[in-house]
Amino acid sequence: MHSEVPRSRRSEDATTPLRSGPLNPNGGVKTLARLLERHRWLMPLLLWLLTLMLWLPGLGNLPLRDWDEGRVATVARSSTSLLPVKWQQPYLNKPPGLHAPMGQLIRLHGEQEVLVRLLPALLSSLAVPMIMLVRRELGGPHQQRRALLTSVVLMTLLPMARHGRLAMLDGALVTCSLLLWWGWLRARQHPFRALTAGLAGSGVLLLKPPALLGLGLIALVVGGGSSWPRWRGWIGLSLGLLPGLSWHLWHWSVRGDAALLMWGGQGLARITSSVGDGHGWWTPWVEVLEGGWPWLLLLPIGLLGAWRQRHHTAGRWQLGLLIGSAALVLPLRTQLPWYSHLLWPPLALLCAEGLDQLLASGRPQWVSRCWQGLGLALSLGGLATLLIPAPPLPSISLLLAGLGLLLGGQAIRHPLTQRRRQGLVILVIGWGLALLALWHSRLWLWELNESWDPRPVATQVRALPADAPVWLKGPTRPSLGWYAGRNLLQYRKSEPPKGLYWLVSNKPMPGCLPSKKPAAGEWQLWRCE
């Protein structure tokens, strides 16, 4: 009779009175994976909620920025119908797609900065779940995991979050572009998707009309003729475009040829000439190089992987979206930092491909080593600014980002896949906490450091009689007009005002008395004869 060999009791074989089978340490993970697979909209929804938690804090802790925030808010408050107005004059630069709902929110609940920025921030944040849906449709190996990584990359990009929080049109435009491409990807099989693409096109027409030409061309060319919708899809696409096209036709019937300015002088003309206070051609390159961290190091890996898969849907679309978006942004003669917003989704798609390879194989290790070096530098910089008196810097933000990169980069070098994934979680948590700390540092909107806070002077202007003429000497400040609640006239030395008037200036003027004891270089209100 054979004797039974005793076997050591292991944790996975353990049973309890309430459990008759062996314990499975991965059961919870597998159950969650099955739940997410069964409810495909659950993960995008959770990511959107996480994005709101990361992007919304501190929305109202800084005044509105010039130019765009002050102008957008002023138009939103002035427009009481679908015809955009600025200071009782027709506003011909942009349609009312964002201005109209913003104006309604302002009139109902007040003019606080957090309310002015809330709707644009909500629309911008939808780009995070939308890019997950787009990446799922591109297919390929590990599409679910890569879709999740793409959303995480986009959510934690500083320019995407920072400019998405502002009262501007660019974040909503990115969301509409992703919705358009997502609808187009399955429009041939599902006419409803073509309708969705058309509605996204209407959104673009009501934000920045000329952009639809480029975004639509990207879909037509990158997808190829085999992806074009069938006749039912074209009907759905046309129905979706109907609201945007109808508004432009109505606008033209009311305002005549002046309505074409948003297509020409304020639209396509930006390709051939500089409009307003545009920056140089280098602006988008600088934005990508300074704002793509920490994920930018993964871009070469993603580009190489996409090139190898260029004959497949995923690789073709990743390369096509990057080339198409660059073709829309880089040739512009009018360049501002937020114009590069369209580049971040294709960059996130490519960087996520490199991140997936890094997590799967641990290579190339130079990426994680660079993260460690950058993390060490940021940690030391954060500590130094805490201990040594220096100009105001986001010390806590630097320290948190540095610790996340240092510890996460170390774990990502581990030979075990599970430890590498834990390292990514550490990195993302550290970077996310750094963003939250930055929002509360009052330094997240650094363009304001280039000028002066308009709110003290605006408070003095609001105290004047409604018919008192107020002039501004110096650069135009739309945010000053917003806070003052009136249109400030531009002072010209060659044509000085006559009679009694009020002047906003940072220098003494002959015949003018300051509203308070002047300080050198301080902007304030002067009473002039």
Image: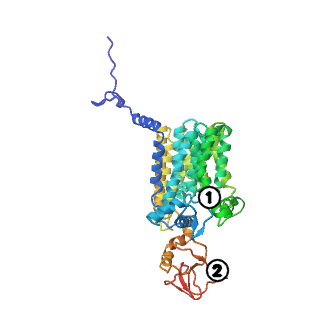
Label 2: which secondary element: loop
Measuring from the top left, give residue 89's x and y in whole percent. Answer: 60, 69
**Could you tell which of marks 2 and 1 lies nearer the N-terminus?**
1
Dot 2 corresponds to which residue? 492
Quadrant containing the N terminus is: top left
What's the distance in space between the residues labelled 2 and 1, CA to CA? 38 Å
Q: Nearer the viewer, residue 190 or 52?
A: 190
Measuring from the top left, give residue 87's x and y in whole percent. Answer: 57, 71
Residue at the far top in the pictured view = 1
Measuring from the top left, give residue 52's x and y in whole percent. Answer: 46, 53
In this rendering, the answer to whether 511 lies above or below 106 is: below
Left or right: 380 as drawn, with respect to 311: left
Measuring from the top left, give residue 466's x and y in whole percent. Answer: 51, 78
Residue 219 visible at all: yes
Question: For mark 1, does the 10 Å Cα neighbourhood hold few (<14), some (14 to 19), or many (20 or more) residues?
Answer: few
Residue at the far left in the pictured view = 17
Give the residue drawn at x 64%, y 49%.
215
Q: Nearer the viewer, residue 48 or 264?
A: 264
Label 1: which secondary element: helix
Q: Amino acid at mark 2?
A: Arg
Q: Amino acid at mark 1?
A: Trp
Q: Nearer the viewer, residue 418 or 455?
A: 455
Q: How many marks?
A: 2
Residue 301 visible at all: no
Depth-wise, is mark 2 or mark 1 nearer the camera?
1
Question: For mark 2, does the 10 Å Cα neighbourhood hold few (<14), some (14 to 19), or many (20 or more) residues?
Answer: few
Left or right: 494 as drawn, with respect to 135: right
Give the residue drawn at x 61%, y 86%.
498
Dot 1 corresponds to which residue? 250
